[in-house]
């Protein structure tokens, strides 16, 4: 991409102008990479949030202590969350939205009633 761009540029451009042209040409690729990295970060946040949700469910009496401490169950739920987030995430979500998706996936996987949205305000990061 850069080689083709350089070949098409006029020879009388300054180094600054060449650099600006290259940056402009690479913007779409840069945006794609940034979005992919953001999706990965959000997916990792979601996977790590599984333990927090399980602890909350245990504290609320929705799952047993054995389920809360079951490492195989946790691993299975982390995999389910990872798969669901891979399908759902665009990269524009807030961490709070990802955490809500995690809670929904766990509720579904554990056959629990989904949490009510209530009057809570959504806060973006």
Image: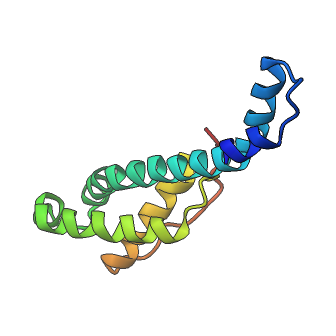
- Residue at image position (57%, 48%) is 33
Give the x, y percent position of residue 58.
24, 58
Task: State the residue in front, 73 or 6.
Answer: 6
The answer to whether residue 104 is left or right of residue 38 is left
The answer to whether residue 61 is left or right of residue 118 is left
Task: State the residue in front, 107 or 5.
Answer: 5
Give the x, y percent position of residue 108.
39, 78
In the image, farthest residue toward the bottom? 111
- Residue at image position (64%, 52%) is 92
Quadrant in the picture for residue 83: bottom left
Would residue 62 be visible to someone looking at this image? no
Task: Quarter of the image for the C terminus: give it.
Answer: top right
In the rendered image of this protein, does residue 103 appear above or below residue 45? below
For the image, the number of numbered tags is 0
- Residue at image position (12%, 58%) is 69
Task: State the residue in front, 34 or 91.
Answer: 34
Would residue 18 be visible to someone looking at this image? yes
In the rendered image of this protein, does residue 82 appear above or below residue 20? below
Quadrant in the picture for residue 12: top right
Tell me the colour scheme of the image.
rainbow
Give the x, y percent position of residue 65.
13, 61
The answer to whether residue 119 is left or right of residue 98 is right
């Amino acid at each position: 991409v850069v080689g083709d761009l350089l070949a098409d540029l006029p020879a009388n451009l300054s180094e600054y102008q060449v650099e600006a042209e290259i940056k402009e040409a690479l913007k779409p690729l840069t945006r794609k990479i940034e979005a992919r990295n953001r999706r990965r970060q959000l997916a990792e946040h979601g996977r790590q949030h599984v333990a927090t949700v399980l602890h909350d469910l245990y504290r609320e009496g929705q799952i047993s202590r054995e389920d809360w401490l079951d490492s195989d169950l946790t691993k299975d739920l982390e995999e389910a969350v990872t798969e669901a987030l891979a399908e759902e995430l665009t990269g524009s979500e807030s961490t709070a939205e990802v955490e809500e998706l995690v809670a929904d996936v766990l509720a579904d996987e554990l056959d629990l009633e989904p949490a009510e949205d209530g009057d809570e305000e959504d806060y973006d990061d």
